[in-house]
Amino acid sequence: MERVLGIGGYFLRAADPVALGAWYRDCLGLDADETGVWQQGAGPTVFAPFESETDYFGSRTQQSMLNFRVRDLAAMLTQLHAKGADVADKTQDMDGVGRFGWVTDPEGNRIELWQPA
């Protein structure tokens, strides 16, 4: 059986694609090139379908949620606060998995930030 090798891209609609791309670059440090290619660090990727009624993604209208691995969750959340980003008040620790925090981008997409254990 042929298998996928990994995530090849993540595409989202935006009212202002240039501004949204700048937000991801300036607030999260996502350094994609002019064609959108981003050479990410090696590490685990989780693929997990959720129940359709979940509130985990924030808004029920959001059909998927992007999760970024981070080195230091506390430092990333501090950086996002300093840039005026919409950061969730709480974080979550999961034994053996890591720490989680959330931010909502300027287009209303909730993003999960994960510091693996």
Image (cartoon, grey):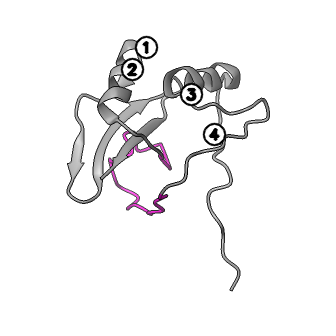
Left or right, 34 with reference to 113: right
Q: Position of residue 82 (x, y in %)?
A: 37, 13
Instruction: Say if 33 sits above or below 27 in the image.
Output: below
Circle 4 packing at 10 Å, graded few (<14), some (14-19), many (20+), is few
- Label 2: which residue? 79
Say which residue appears at 46% left-offset and 60% top-offset: 46
Left or right, 20 with reference to 55: right
Q: Position of residue 77 (x, y in %)?
A: 34, 27
Residue flagged by tag 1: what amino acid is it? Answer: Lys
**Which numbered disc covers residue 24?**
3
Q: Is residue 54 magenta?
A: yes
Query: Label 2 vs label 3: CA separation?
Result: 13 Å
Question: What residue range appears in magenta?
Answer: 44-66
Query: Label 3 vs label 4: CA separation?
Result: 12 Å
- The secondary structure type at the circle numbered 3 is helix
- Label 1: which residue? 83
Q: Nearer the viewer, mark 2 or mark 3?
A: 2
Query: Label 4 vs label 2: CA separation?
Result: 24 Å
- The secondary structure type at the circle numbered 1 is loop
Label count reads 4
Q: Nearer the viewer, mark 4 or mark 2?
A: 2
Residue flagged by tag 4: what amino acid is it? Answer: Leu
Foreground pick, 81 / 110: 81
Circle 1 packing at 10 Å, graded few (<14), some (14-19), many (20+), is few
Q: Nearer the viewer, mark 3 or mark 4?
A: 3
Residue flagged by tag 2: what amino acid is it? Answer: Gln
Q: Could you say which quadrant of the image residue 78 lies in?
A: top left
Ranked by sequence position, the earlier of labels 1 and 3 is 3
Say which residue appears at 73% left-offset and 36% top-offset: 36
Query: Label 1 vs label 4: CA separation?
Result: 22 Å
- Label 4: which residue? 12
